[in-house]
Each structure stands twice: as structure tokens, then as C-alpha cells.
Image (cartoon, rainbow, N blue to C red):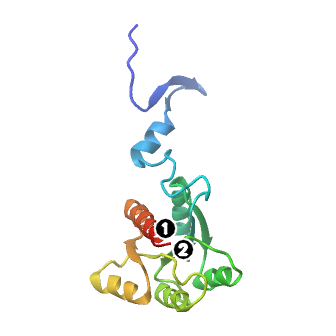
Amino acid sequence: MRQVKTLGLLGTGVIAGAATDVIDTGYWLTMAWKDWFRDAPQASESRGPRRVLVVEDSAFFRQLLVPSLGAAGYRATAAVSAAEALKLRDAGVMFDAILSDIEMPDMNGLEFARVVRQSGPWADLPMIALTGHIEQRDVEAGRDAGFTDYVAKFEREALLASLQQCLSETVAVA
């Protein structure tokens, strides 16, 4: 009998009386996200993973972003509001970069960026705006408020590229 090898399929077995394909999750994860099992380019042995603060009021997006950033090699911390993020700053918690939603209740992302840029230990951190509104006037308003970059929420690859670029520029300047 000739064995046929199918990419992404380890074999077939009988589970609970039914023929079941056993898939290679490693294969399929790397098909979806090329960087899934790679060491993060921003991690260094002496420093460890880069720390990223995610400021996002939507539980749905927080649950998408934090694991995605972790899979890319970042150590992500989530804050549900700008006020919660500022409490972290005031408590002395440091990050390498900040990702912030724009549309949030109480203090929106533009106001949050302005407060961060005014003074304090986060004033010079890279800040990336995450939003569903990416028209030119929105991008300009974000940059005027102090965001380093402006990325659409559902653009994972663009977010990771922006984050890597912002962090590499920070290291080059430091």
C-alpha cells in the first residue's frame, strides 16, 4: 500500500467511532501567520521581550490584540481605558510602546495621546493609533495629537510592521 503525504495532515484515526483527520497545527498556524513560531526580532537575550501597552475599551479587540502580540514575541498588557493606562504611568510602570484605540468613552485616544506627550515617563514612547477610521484627515489628527503611526484595527501585519519600525527607530535614537 502506497502512503500519500498531504501537507498539514498527520494522519487519520478512529475517535469515538468516527474516522478523524489529525491535522498538524504547526503547519496551519504558520500558513496563517508566518511569524508564529519564530523568535521575535525585537526580543534580545539581555532585555527580553519588548513591553507593549494596549489601551482598548472593547473586550473583543483586547482579546484579539493581546494574544496576537504575544505570538509575535511582545509582552502585552491591556488597559480598558485611558484613565486606567494613566494610572499605570503614575504608578511607574514602563513600556516600550503604546497601542491605543481612538474611539473610547470618557477620554478618547487623541486626548490620551496629548496627555501622554505633555510630560512624564511615557512622553517619548512610540504611540500607535488603532482605529477603524483611516481617512487622511483622521491620520493627520492622530499625528497632530502625538501618535507616531496610525493603523487600521484589523490590519495585523501592518500593526506588527509599524510596531517593529517604531521600536527599531527608538533603539537607534537611544
Residue at (50% x, 77% y) in the render: 100
* Amino acid type at image mark 1: Val
With 149 as the anchor, is 47 left or right in this view? right
Q: How many other residues sit within 10 Å of disc 2, few (<14), some (14-19) or many (≥20)?
A: few
With 125 as the anchor, is 136 left or right in this view? left
Residue at (48% x, 27% y) in the render: 10
Image spot of residue 8 (x, y percent): 43, 33
- Mark seen at residue 123: none
Q: Residue furthest top?
A: 1
Image spot of residue 37 (x, y percent): 50, 44
Residue at (48% x, 48% y) in the render: 36
Q: Which residue is mark 1?
A: 171
- Mark seen at residue 58: 2
Cβ–Cβ below 8 Å for labels 2 and 1?
Answer: no
Note whether 54 is above or below 142 in the view shown.
above
Image spot of residue 106 (x, y percent): 56, 90
Q: Secondary structure at mark 2?
A: loop
Image spot of residue 170 (x, y percent): 47, 71
Residue at (60% x, 70% y) in the render: 78
Q: Secondary structure at mark 1?
A: helix
Of the 4 image quadrants, the one containing the N terminus is top left
In-front residue for pair 43/31: 43
Q: Could you tell me how far apart the alpha carbons at marks 2 and 1 are, in whole angstroms?
A: 31 Å
In-front residue for pair 9/156: 156
